[in-house]
């Protein structure tokens, strides 16, 4: 079952159950997927769908930080609840040991030795992780390994 079909089914279930929070999140994700499909002018594959959901999750994380900085704990709590709902639609995060192994392998294969090679390494690592690792975590780890 595609992510979009799963979201549609969850939207119907949330409507029946009266779960307004879930319904709002699911509708936003469906709208973002539709916009991405229109922008791409083609159907989205699983990687593209995951990328869209990850970007929405990233926006929620940034909002949480900003609300906390502004002293708006009520809004931060609401964003956290929505983030929890979103994580259901994301693949499980790759653990640190697996990610480290992939990064080490890519660095060895590409012969990367300096920060100039960082982009090449990150691109290869992201392709191999299949959406199971956040770009920021990959970037920080690669930077650390290449001596940045």
Image: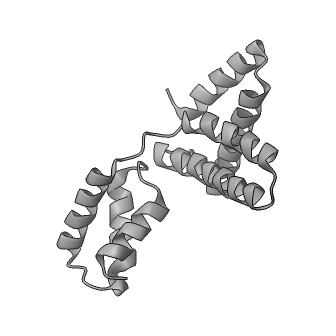
Question: Residue 48, position in %: x, y?
Answer: 52, 50
Q: Is residue 113 left or right of residue 76?
A: left
In the picture as drawn, the residue positioned furthest to the top comes out as: 16
Tell me if I can see residue 63 in this picture: yes
Q: Residue at x 80, y 60 (%)?
A: 70
Location of residue 60 with respect to 3 vertically, above or below = below
Depth order, front residue of 2/71? 71
Number of on-image labels: 0
Quadrant of image for the C terminus = bottom left
Depth order, front residue of 36/139? 139
Q: Residue at x 33, y 65 (%)?
A: 124
Location of residue 48 with respect to 112 vertically, above or below = above
Question: Residue 43, position in %: x, y?
Answer: 57, 44
Location of residue 137 with respect to 12 vertically, above or below = below
Depth order, front residue of 82/35? 82
Tell me where residue 16 sits by quadrant: top right
Question: Residue 40, position in %: x, y?
Answer: 61, 55
Q: Residue at x 75, y 61 (%)?
A: 69
Tell me, what colour scheme is on the image?
A: one colour
Tell me if I can see residue 41 in this picture: no
Question: Residue 22, position in %: x, y?
Answer: 71, 29
Location of residue 16 with respect to 63 vertically, above or below = above
Q: Residue at x 59, y 27 (%)?
A: 5
């Amino acid at each position: 079952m595609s992510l979009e079909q799963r979201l549609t089914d969850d939207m119907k279930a949330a409507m029946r159950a009266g779960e307004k929070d879930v319904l709002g999140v699911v509708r936003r994700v469906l709208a973002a997927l539709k916009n991405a499909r229109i922008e791409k002018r083609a159907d989205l594959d699983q990687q593209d769908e995951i990328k869209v959901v990850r970007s929405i999750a990233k926006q929620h994380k940034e909002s949480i930080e900003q609300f906390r900085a502004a002293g708006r704990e009520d809004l931060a709590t609401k964003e956290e609840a929505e983030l929890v709902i979103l994580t259901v639609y994301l693949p499980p995060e790759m653990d640190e040991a697996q990610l480290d192994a992939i990064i080490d392998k890519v660095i060895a294969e590409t012969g990367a030795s300096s920060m100039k090679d960082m982009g090449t390494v990150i691109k290869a690592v992201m392709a191999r992780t299949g959406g199971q690792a956040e770009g920021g975590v990959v970037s920080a780890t690669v930077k650390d390994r290449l001596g940045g």
